Image (cartoon, rainbow, N blue to C red):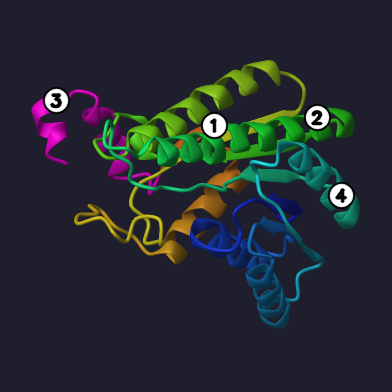
Amino acid sequence: MAGSILLTGASSGIGRALAYEMAKKGYALALTSRKTDVLNEIRDDIEKRYHPPALVVRGLDVTDYDDVFAAVDEMAEALGGLDIVFANAGIGLGEKVGRGDFEKARRTIEVNLIGAIATVDAAAAYFLKQGSGHIVGTSSVAAFRGMPRSSAYSASKAGLAIYLEAVRAEMYRKHIDVTVLYPGYIDTPLNRMLPSRPFLISVEKGAAIIARLIEKKVKSATVPVFPWNLVGPLLKMLPTGVISRM
């Protein structure tokens, strides 16, 4: 099964690893990131290794909302169409409430939530015209319970998950699938500063799992599925005192 996929946040972490994984599976790729120099290096390396049917890169800051819509249309035209748009770009700045970190919180919400919403909205507009498509968004197990020192991050990921559920309902019977992914601790620069990362998996393993879930067009799933499919919901039931020590 192959087609075409647009990935935001493709210069590092999950996005970068997934670009390699999808190229290996034979997909045509449209990769975006703020770091165009890194994207160019990734493009050259992927083309050398996997010879994908097409690979285009474009600089994109998902908080430049008008440019998000332009990017989706441009890259769809460059590839001759898009099958999947993966709203993956995200940051984690580790802000503390009431400690002068509001700017970090604002930036987190702008990138992780509003930037992702812009990406999904642009994808939906394109897929409605095309008559079909698949929208994928990266939430997090942090969406299951607000975590200390990650308040804005948790809120952004919970908000995105709920937004995508609403999009799924709006796209019902319009031949547009919507997938919400809830990664646990995948070894990326986003979380390497944390003192504890339970059930940690490599980014390559995470990308392989994500690729399989995308191809299955699941509605939602944790990554990896086990043990987070059990642990995630349990987070909601833990006493606040326990959560405060995490």
> Is 70 placed above or below 143 here?
below
Q: Amino acid at mark 2?
A: Ala
Q: Amino acid at mark 3?
A: Thr
Q: Please name the residue that numbered disc 2 is placed on.
A: 125
Q: Relative to 77, is 159 on the left or the right?
A: left
What's the mark number on residue 219? Answer: 1
Residue 241 position in % (x across, y down): 9, 28
Q: Please name the residue that numbered disc 3 is placed on.
A: 240
* Other-residue count near label 2 (Cα within 10 Å), few / some / many at <14 / 14–19 / ≥20: some
Closer to viewer: mark 3 or mark 1: 3
Is residue 159 visible in the rendered structure shown here? Answer: yes
Image point (76%, 53%), residue name: 4
Q: Indicate the secondary structure of the residue bearing disc 3.
A: helix
Q: Amino acid at mark 4?
A: Glu
The answer to which of marks 4 and 2 sits earlier in the sequence is 4
Residue 216 position in % (x across, y down): 58, 43
User: What segment carries the magenta color?
Assistant: 223-246
Is residue 181 visible in the rendered structure shown here? Answer: no
The span from disc 3 to disc 4 (Cα, nearest Å) is: 47 Å
Q: Based on the displayed image, in which of its 4 quarters is residue 243 positioned?
A: top left
Closer to viewer: mark 2 or mark 3: 3
Farthest residue in the bottom direction?
48
* Other-residue count near label 3 (Cα within 10 Å), few / some / many at <14 / 14–19 / ≥20: few
Q: Amino acid at mark 1?
A: Lys
Q: Indicate the secondary structure of the residue bearing disc 2.
A: helix
The span from disc 4 to disc 2 (Cα, nearest Å) is: 13 Å
Q: Based on the displayed image, in which of its 4 quarters is residue 20 positioned?
A: bottom right
* Other-residue count near label 1 (Cα within 10 Å), few / some / many at <14 / 14–19 / ≥20: some
What's the mark number on residue 74? Answer: 4
Please report contact status of discs 2 and 3: CB closer than 8 Å, yes or no.
Answer: no
Q: Quadrant of the N terminus?
A: bottom right
The answer to which of marks 3 and 1 sits earlier in the sequence is 1
